[in-house]
Image (spheres, helix red, strand yellow):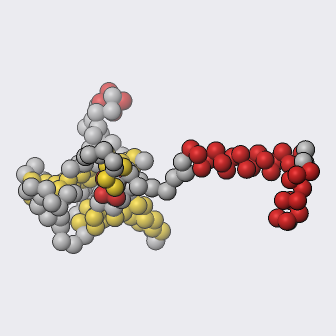
């Protein structure tokens, strides 16, 4: 999932039609994020107009309107020079109607609010697995190898289940006299 938020304000008259058609207007893209929380957001309408927030796979940074980095942190808190994320929620006013609120990597919302109607969009990171399989793996017979632990059926278990299902199906279609006693006792 990728999320793009644009400003639909009219294009300034000073821009040439050829520049508009060529897509050289980059100031209308306010925010772009994907499901891994990689992207950016530009504050365009609050007191801190021009502040940019950039999210990467390793971490995030906040830059001032002049381009200097004000704060930087990594998602992995145990990494060297990890920094610390903002203490409170980070609010980025994208437009008069759109506000991005960053609490943590998995809790990021964009609120659309216009004329009394509002809608919250969850644009935080979506991960399939909370833990790495190496954390729950067990040591195998071979030295140094980890075997993932999860509930699964072995090939022999699947074979015996399939054989019993097919036996029941076969007995329903062409019953044998030796299996009729099992059917009466079971049912």
* Residue at x 28%, y 64% (from the top left corner): 104
Tell me: 69 left or right of 87.
left
Q: Nearer the viewer, residue 64 or 70?
A: 70
Viewer-closest of 24 and 149: 149
Residue lying at 13% horizontally and 56% vertically, measured from the top left: 79
In the depicted structure, whether residue 105 falls above or below residue 10: below
Q: Is residue 112 visible?
A: no
- Quadrant of res 51: bottom left
Q: Position of residue 182 (x, y in %)?
A: 84, 59
Question: Furthest residue to the front?
Answer: 178
Q: Quadrant of residue 46?
A: bottom left
- Could you tell me residue 91's position as x and y percent? 26, 65
Q: Residue at x 74, y 49 (%)?
A: 165
Q: Report the side of 175 relative to 2 (left or right).
A: right
Q: Is residue 177 visible?
A: yes
Determine which quarter of the picture holds residue 112: bottom left
Residue 47: x, y in percent?
Answer: 18, 65
Residue drawn at point x = 8 percent, y = 56 percent: 81
Q: Looking at the rendering, in which quadrant would you find the C terminus?
A: bottom right
Q: How many marks?
A: 0
């Amino acid at each position: 999932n990728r999320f793009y938020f644009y400003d639909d304000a009219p294009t300034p008259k000073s821009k040439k039609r050829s520049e508009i058609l060529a897509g050289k207007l980059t100031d209308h893209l306010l925010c772009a994020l994907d499901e891994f929380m990689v992207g950016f957001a530009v504050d365009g309408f609050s007191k801190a107009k021009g502040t940019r927030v950039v999210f990467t796979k390793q971490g995030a940074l906040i830059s001032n309107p002049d381009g200097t980095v004000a704060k930087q942190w990594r998602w992995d808190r145990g990494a060297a020079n990890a920094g610390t994320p903002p203490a409170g929620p980070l609010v980025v006013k994208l437009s008069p109607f759109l506000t991005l609120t960053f609490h943590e990597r998995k809790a990021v919302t964009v609120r659309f609010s216009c004329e009394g109607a509002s809608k919250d969009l969850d644009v935080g990171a979506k991960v399939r697995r909370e833990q790495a399989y190496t954390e729950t793996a067990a040591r195998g017979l071979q030295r140094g190898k980890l075997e993932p632990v999860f509930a699964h059926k072995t090939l022999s278990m699947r074979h015996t289940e399939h054989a019993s299902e097919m036996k029941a199906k076969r007995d329903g279609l062409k019953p044998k006299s030796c299996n009729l006693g099992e059917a009466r006792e079971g049912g």
